Image: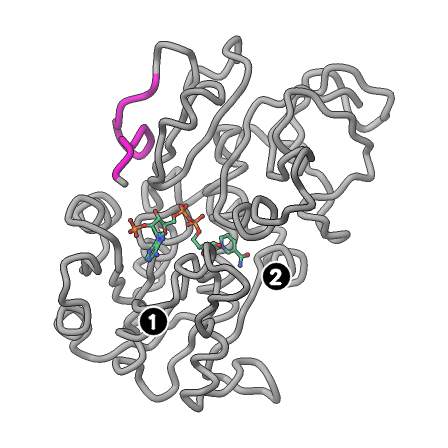
Amino acid sequence: MLLKTRWLTLDPYMRSGFMLQPDNVGKTVIGGTVSEVVESKAPTWQTGDLVVGFYGWQEYSVGTASDVQWNNPNMPIQKWDGSLGEPSTALGVLGMTGLTAYEGLKNVAKVQPGETVVVSAASGAVGQVVGQLAKIHGARAVGIAGGPAKCAFCVDEFGFDACVDYKAGNLGADLAGATPDGIDIYFENVGGDVLEAVIPRLNPGARIPICGFIAHYNETPTARRVNPLQRLRAEGLEVLGKDGNTKGYTFFTFSNLSSRHPDAENALEILSAWIKSGQLKYRESVTDGSSGYWAAGNSARRWCVSPADSRHSQCSATSIPIPSSSRGWIPAMH
Ligand SMILES: NC(=O)c1ccc[n+]([C@@H]2O[C@H](COP(=O)([O-])OP(=O)(O)OC[C@H]3O[C@@H](n4cnc5c(N)ncnc54)[C@H](OP(=O)(O)O)[C@@H]3O)[C@@H](O)[C@H]2O)c1
């Protein structure tokens, strides 16, 4: 198949997983893609189909029907079902980041009604979904984000019960105020000082799905701090799932879980239904082409499509969508 890239995404894992590796200089940057089939000799793929794949940062790619996403043999490329939502969401709320939130909260942490869920990088692509899923499951959602604008966004737009600004300088006290009953689930996206503030608030029986630790991604091999797994082990916590443990911490990747859990193949339909019913909102940062993309900064999600002749209305050179209901453009807040 000859594939024309329509949507690309920039995600934190690229920094540590690709861009900081000297051997990768000159190679095509890895990444999730939505591409249009331009020509096909594969019987199951027709011209015009949209392929959700992992073809990286290039305008065109050549694929086969047996290609996989995320180098995971259990995640074949997928024909985008337009009834689920906009194609861009295949790289976000109805793709990697939404599925990560869904798997981590539901199938790893096994969220229960009445529990307190804290999520760091709360306004990010994963965090914003985690908080809303916590609410959908009857839990209390508390975000940790950088700055008053992002915190207001979590509470006002996404319905978090509270959000703590870790840049305000009182993280420990502010988090204690926002979690009067302690923390039952900490959805870890950050590590570092944020994790240090969370540890004293953890309830007995707490679960800590470790999704990522973005505060560590720029560390060099010679200047590494202990990562959340090491830190929580040192704290004496159990490994969740090991020997049947129902509490403690564990690192998980969405691609391993999304191909394993009983409800995995329905997860996209479930998330899509919540979006359609208004229970799950999302925001995307969209740029048209790579030049705009570099200026977009780092908010909830960054998309770019090239070239500018895209038929996707969200992404034309002159028209970036303004926030309306649950979708739109977030100005760079970094
Ligand atoms: N395990 C998996 O399968 C999986 C899948 C997807 C993502 N992830 C991980 O999930 C995490 C979130 O990903 P995402 O896609 O939601 O990211 P994102 O949308 O790019 O948001 C990342 C946010 O992290 C916050 N951040 C960055 N540096 C920080 C620091 N030093 N201290 C505290 N906060 C910091 C920033 O928000 P503030 O301005 O609020 O600080 C930033 O906006 C990352 O660690 C990523 O690697 C894991």
Q: Label 1, secondary structure: give it.
A: helix
Ligand 1 within 8 A of label 1's CB? no
Image point 86% across, 25% down: which residue?
43
Q: Position of residue 113 (x, y in %)?
A: 32, 71
Residue 257's label in the rendered image is: 2
* In the image: residue 262, left or right of residue 112: right
Give whichever of discs 1 and 2 has the lower sequence position.
Answer: 1
Q: Magenta span covers which residues?
A: 320-333
Q: Main secondary structure of the magenta part?
A: loop
Q: Are marks 1 and 2 in contact (CB under 8 Å)?
A: no
Q: Position of residue 54 (x, y in %)?
A: 66, 38
Residue 161 can be seen in this image = no
Magenta-colored stretch includes residue 73: no
Image point 68% across, 33% down: which residue?
26
Tag in front: 1 or 2:
1
* In the image: residue 151, left or right of residue 92: left
Query: Where, by quadrant of the figure, is residue 333 drawn?
Result: top left
**Which residue has dot 1 on it?**
195
Cα distance between the residues tagged 1 and 2? 24 Å
Q: Position of residue 59 (x, y in %)?
A: 64, 20
The three-letter code of the residue at mark 2 reads Leu
Magenta-colored stretch includes residue 324: yes
How many numbered markers are drawn? Answer: 2
Ligand 1 within 8 A of label 2's CB? yes
Q: Look at the picture and state if 181 lies above or below 2.
A: below
Residue 233's label in the rendered image is: none
